[in-house]
Amino acid sequence: MSMSSFLIIYLCCLVTMLLCRCVPLLALKGRTLPDNLVRALNLIPPAAFAALVANDLFSPGMFDAGLWQGLMPLAAAVLTMVVGYLRKSLVLCIVVGVGSYALMMLLL
């Protein structure tokens, strides 16, 4: 790819990103949004995180290496969900999730 082609693509991406990120901020500055829209916008981060987690938990070939290999991420996720529900601590969820998965990997 030549430098001029790269610069054209880079500038197009830059302009698009600035338009998508800056124009809404400037257009909505000082205005209050309807409650339904605020509630809908508040669901975006959990939905994005759930999509990332689901992508890692459920893969097409997850049971190719064996049943236990496929169930390990699910078991760690269930344990993390229980700890999260009981303790409501993000740090503890991270420690339990990573620790339980690492322990299951060592035991296998």
Image (cartoon, rainbow, N blue to C red):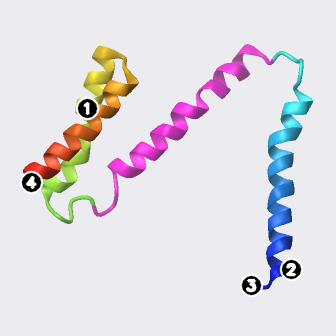
Q: Quadrant of residue 23?
A: top right
Q: Which of 97 and 58 lies nearest the eye of the viewer?
A: 97
Which numbered mark, 2 or 4, is in the foreground of this view?
2
Q: Judge whether 62 appears above or below 19 on screen.
A: below
CA separation, marks 2 and 3?
Answer: 8 Å
Nearer-N-terminus badge (3/1): 3
- Report the front residue among 72 and 37: 72
| 89 left or right of 99 in image | right
Badge 1 amino acid = Val
Q: Any mark on residue 4, and which?
A: 2
Type of amino acid at the residue the image marks with label 2: Ser
Disc ID at residue 1? 3
Mark 2 or mark 4: name the one nearer the start of the chain: 2
Q: Is residue 48 visible?
A: yes
From the top left corner, tell me how far across and down residue 25 is, in percent: 84, 32
Contact, mark 2 vs mark 4 (Cβ under 8 Å): no
Report how far apart the C-alphas of labels 4 and 3 lie in the structure.
Answer: 47 Å
| Image disc number at residue 9 | none
Which comes sooner in the sequence, label 4 or label 1?
1
Percent position (x, y) of residue 66? Answer: 14, 61
What is the number of the mark on residue 96?
A: 1
How packed mark 3 is, by other alpha carbons closer than 10 Å (few <14, some 14-19, many 20 or more), is few
**Counting residues from the N terminus, which is met first, the one under dot 2 or under dot 1?**
2
Mark 4 in CB contact with mark 3 (< 8 angstroms): no
- The magenta segment: 33-61
**Residue shown at the point (62%, 25%) measured from the top left:** 42
Q: Is residue 54 left or right of residue 75?
A: right
Q: Secondary structure at mark 3?
A: loop
